[in-house]
């Protein structure tokens, strides 16, 4: 047999990827074969010549990372796995079955997949986080390769990634744009005008080139040029044909996201099934041992002093950074408001400024945690909404992220409703596997920040702008899933359930009620998810179901809903009154706004009084 | 007195804006005077020479639109209002007071403000929507002027706006970037390298120029050039000084978002208070009378047939478009999945393709409604999460938007969790003033689409990928806030509360239970917000609190929480069991995934059986 050139082998490998893409989607009856066929040659050259990856040690930072930002091309990724010998021929045709790890879009159920993709425009910004880790934290000469679709270039998050990658000089990052021209329902805005992508990328500070995406020699040269480029990231804009190699679908609209009508004919046209095996190159470097964690010395605040919980977040984060060398912090250009700046000053080598680009901020955190770092990300709670799809997808990625949203609720005062996080509790409760925390004092905040660093999944801490009284001693402990009963007696006639700023209002309300002879239990429900159901059930039992919930948040999906749900299976008929923000707030002083929203001490006391009075006739029953 | 030149008058006007910015923030003790002072000359020339706006008829489409994308420069906007004579000197110093319409960031509480800003990166994409309306719907030669900050150029949404504005050839749109170099906590990524912004804008297809932002003659020439430019939008990149004119703060870091320390000295340095009045030019055109609505002929589906609710959405939307000339539609490049394409084919002149740019899609809808159109926006329910901050802000804008999220829940099947909307009910319930609808059949969907067109605020319709049986007759009526009790008897021992796909599972469960002699009430809670509390309270009373809620959604913040909250003040002790998706779904067939999530008929019946059995000893009690 004549020796096979690299180019010949890669061409054949590309055809094998196409055939396997057709086979998998035919077996499943769905999938995106045409979107995979366009990128087959690009990936054949990458995995046969450039990618360095140890399939036996996929989490090692010494590996290159490969991210399919166009996650719908999953059959191409799985075809690579078969060629690499880590997935069998039997397994690939179980694609999309309920018991297969080869899901419709890649997820980390697959050991070699770092992050879930499938919501377009996320893979490249996540790759920025991975490249930051390699260049600045690991200081390893590994590379991050991201396969992008041309449709997803319309997502603003891609341009956040472009600007940040250039800003940080990420020459270890290569983006490959598979310009097959056709989106789901027609041509993209740019079509095959590849120069547009190139010009834009250059304007954003990247090294950019245009190539024929089915010419394996041109692809090889492009990758070599990317590797040789220093000081800035490289994008390879590749002209490709959607459905390349199968006339019935090639470069035709209307075949997105569908199995081919005649897979047998297509496979024949592609030259039949192949069984080429490739040895993906192993890393040539090894990752440094991470430093072990040291003792944690949290900040301590005097009871009775006034400290903002956001300030305590910054203090605690800096302390955590001293104890744990794996903690890294990103912030959205508001570190002097969230107080992430305290960490930034203490540990500048582990702080990345993400500017006003919340999607990139969360994506960077996802990328950082994928390679073993422990990221904390902060901005105003209102503006975390900007990155909600990234948080949703982070849950699909089984990511561990600690998020902090400051300036929650109407208590921020004069800046007005655009700056007030009022839907954050609802949104973060709805994230799969999440933890939602809302402290009311500085010592509690510090303890919860420490707990977040030990919590898997996505945890969210909601902090306040104004100073609040320190009511807990520095040594008080706070479990995730716990609560604190701040007032209680055998005579409790009503329970006040609060978190954050409303804890202080509830305490004042309890004082007002006590003056009138009404004993009110006060529960600080700082852990909104998971939630201390036992404390709530006991409170309901003690007060014959008379509970006032009070939150600086919209009425739907927040603390009140969580409490109502926790009590929806109890022996006691319920008289739960939910106090929450119900009208659009305006500017004003915090106290004015709490009063106007009906969530201050006076309104809590009034609600409690009404509850107690309504049941008075039964008082001895 | 010597005649004053335009340039002299404008320079003085700029100084007046600065003085008033200082005065307002001094009176409030907060605000962003330095961010306003940088843009004062730009706005002086705009309002004194270019803007055409009738303050007595602010909603008229004949007006130019002025959007402060950098909403924190609110004192500059309010200074313009004083100069225009629509706000008094007394009113401006009430800035940020609780009873003032002059909030910390502009909102439509002010009659001349179209949309709320203050979440950066939103004003320009909203301006794209307004410019689309003017150019393609109104066909009026009006202009949209958007003042942008340089910090917000880091937001990807700005680049979505850049690409879309160029794609649609919006030569009626002018962006003004106030490049004062300094963000909240330091320099922007680009600083004063104005050429970077210019190059990027040109690469995105804009006419772009760089000017000195305090040179009123250069500013005048730039606006003239913008007006004269055809075929593409114009961006004016202006080099400015933050805090311009007051040495204590000019071009210095650390003075963002703060009142000046010595306002009196600053006012003196700026030449003292002025009282220049300007006559803002009136529109030279008048808006066409809108066509009146005609009769609505909704699609009708045969009971017993199988139709996807997403398909009914598209059919109904096209019918609505025929009846109502004010209905416009935007979609995120998935119109063949959401079925918005049916409208697009029927009414191509009122359909705008937004490609895969969900933030721009929602922003365009906000801009369209601001000038009197009735937008419907659609994409996968999962991907609406991408635009959540835009929806949040739309509520602050008091916007009326109809949103449709298709492919909700695990019932989509093989595509896997990245494509499944599982947090959408929670998120949209938490939007202020929202309506959340989740139909289970095609006739119900059509009726609800029609109802959305009559509903103020933000309404959300959740549709399904698979076909579902048509169970309602075409003439059945569905009120927002209503429900349908599909099974009921005097013997009901348990109630099953469902919406969407789970209605059909609940019906099957009721059949299973009936075979065992257990009567189950079945409630179709298609209106999740507002919600039919009465029907739920009656169900609780009839079943002694035994209720199974079942939803194809995460367990937190969805239908189950809404039901628990509605029942949290009842005489009946509750035994509510919430069935919802609790583990991360995988790929698979819809039926497999419903079973795996524990929300199919078998699981509903099992939960109901357990509830009935648990209370059996009390059955005659």
Image (spheres, coloured by chain):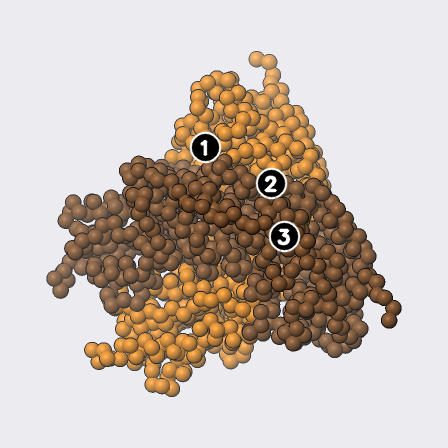
Chain colours: A orange, B brown
Camera-near label (2 vs 1) is 2
| Residue on which the image places disc 3 | B286
Compared across the picture, whether A405 is left or right of B286 comes to left
Task: Say if labels 3 and 1 share a chain.
Answer: no
| Residue on which the image places disc 1 | A31
Of residues B77 and A500, the one drawn nearer to the viewer in this rendering: B77
- Which of the chains bears the disc numbered 3? B
Q: From what the image shows, is residue A58 above or below residue A372?
A: above
Say few, some or many: other residues with alpha carbon within 10 Å of mark 3 (under 14 / 14 to 19 / 20 or more).
few
User: Mark 2 or mark 1, which has the lower sequence index?
Assistant: 1
Q: Are the residues tagged 3 and 1 within 8 Å (C-beta)?
A: no
Residue A181 can be seen in this image: yes
| Residue on which the image places disc 2 | A153
Of residues A16 and B320, the one drawn nearer to the viewer in this rendering: B320
- Measured Cα–Cα span from mark 3 to mark 1: 52 Å
Q: How many marks?
A: 3
Residue at horizontal 80%, vertical 59%? B216
Q: From what the image shows, is residue A343 above or below residue A246?
A: below
Residue B43 can be seen in this image: no
- Which of the chains bears the disc numbered 2? A
Q: Are the residues tagged 3 and 2 within 8 Å (C-beta)?
A: no
Which quadrant does the N terminus of chain B fall into? bottom right
């Amino acid at each position: 047999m004549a020796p096979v050139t690299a180019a010949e082998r890669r061409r054949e490998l590309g055809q094998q990827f196409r055939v396997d893409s057709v086979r998998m989607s035919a077996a499943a009856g769905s999938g995106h074969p045409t979107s995979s066929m366009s990128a087959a040659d690009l990936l054949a050259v990458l995995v046969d010549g450039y990618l360095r990856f140890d399939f036996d040690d996929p989490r090692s930072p010494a590996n290159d990372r490969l991210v399919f930002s166009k996650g719908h091309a999953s059959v191409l990724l799985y075809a690579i796995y078969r060629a690499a010998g880590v997935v069998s021929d039997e397994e690939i045709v179980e694609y999309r079955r309920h018991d297969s790890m080869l899901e419709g879009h890649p997820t980390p159920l697959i050991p070699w997949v770092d992050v879930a993709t499938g919501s377009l425009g996320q893979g490249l910004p996540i790759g920025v986080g991975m490249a930051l880790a390699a260049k600045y934290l690991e200081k390893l000469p590994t590379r991050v390769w991201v396969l992008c679709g041309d449709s997803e270039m319309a997502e603003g998050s891609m341009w956040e990634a472009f600007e940040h990658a250039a800003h940080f000089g990420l020459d270890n990052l290569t983006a490959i744009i598979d310009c097959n021209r056709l989106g789901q329902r027609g041509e993209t805005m740019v079509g095959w005008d590849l120069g547009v992508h190139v010009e834009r990328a250059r304007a954003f500070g990247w090294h950019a080139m245009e190539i024929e995406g089915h010419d394996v020699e041109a692809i090889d040269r492009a990758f070599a040029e990317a590797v040789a480029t220093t000081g800035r990231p490289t994008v390879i804009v590749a002209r490709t044909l959607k459905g390349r190699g199968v006339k019935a679908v090639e470069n035709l609209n209307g075949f997105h996201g569908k199995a081919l009508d005649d897979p047998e004919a297509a496979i024949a046209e592609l030259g039949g099934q192949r069984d080429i095996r490739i040895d993906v190159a192993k890393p040539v470097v090894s990752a440094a041992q991470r430093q072990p964690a040291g003792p944690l010395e949290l900040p301590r605040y005097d009871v009775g002093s006034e400290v903002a919980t956001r300030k305590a977040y910054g203090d605690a984060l800096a302390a955590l950074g001293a104890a744990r060398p794996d903690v890294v912090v990103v912030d959205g250009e508001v570190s002097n408001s969230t107080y992430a700046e305290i960490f930034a000053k203490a540990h500048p080598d582990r702080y990345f400024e993400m500017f006003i680009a919340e999607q990139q901020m969360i994506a960077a955190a996802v990328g950082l945690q994928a390679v073993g770092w422990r990221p904390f990300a902060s901005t105003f709670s209102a503006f975390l909404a900007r990155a909600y799809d990234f948080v949703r997808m982070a849950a699909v990625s089984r990511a561990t992220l600690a998020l902090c949203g400051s300036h929650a609720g109407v208590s921020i005062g004069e800046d007005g409703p655009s700056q007030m996080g009022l839907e954050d509790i609802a949104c973060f409760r709805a994230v799969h596997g999440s933890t939602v925390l809302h402290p009311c004092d500085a010592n509690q905040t510090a303890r919860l920040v420490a707990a977040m660093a030990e919590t898997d999944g996505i945890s969210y801490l909601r902090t306040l702008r104004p100073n609040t009284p320190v009511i807990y001693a520095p040594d008080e402990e706070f479990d995730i899933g716990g609560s604190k009963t701040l007032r209680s007696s055998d005579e409790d006639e009503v329970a006040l359930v609060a978190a954050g700023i409303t804890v202080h209002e509830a305490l004042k309300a309890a004082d007002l009620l006590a003056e009138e002879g009404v004993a009110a239990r006060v529960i600080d429900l700082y852990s909104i998810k998971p939630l201390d159901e036992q404390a709530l059930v006991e409170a309901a039992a003690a007060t014959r179901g008379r509970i006032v919930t009070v939150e600086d948040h919209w009425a739907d999906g927040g603390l009140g809903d969580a409490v109502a749900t926790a009590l929806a299976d109890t022996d006691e008929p319920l008289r739960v009154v939910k106090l929450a923000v119900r009208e659009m707030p305006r500017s004003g002083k915090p106290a004015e706004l709490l009063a106007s929203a009906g969530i201050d001490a006076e309104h809590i006391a009034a609600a409690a009084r009404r509850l107690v009075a309504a049941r008075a006739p039964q008082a001895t029953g």
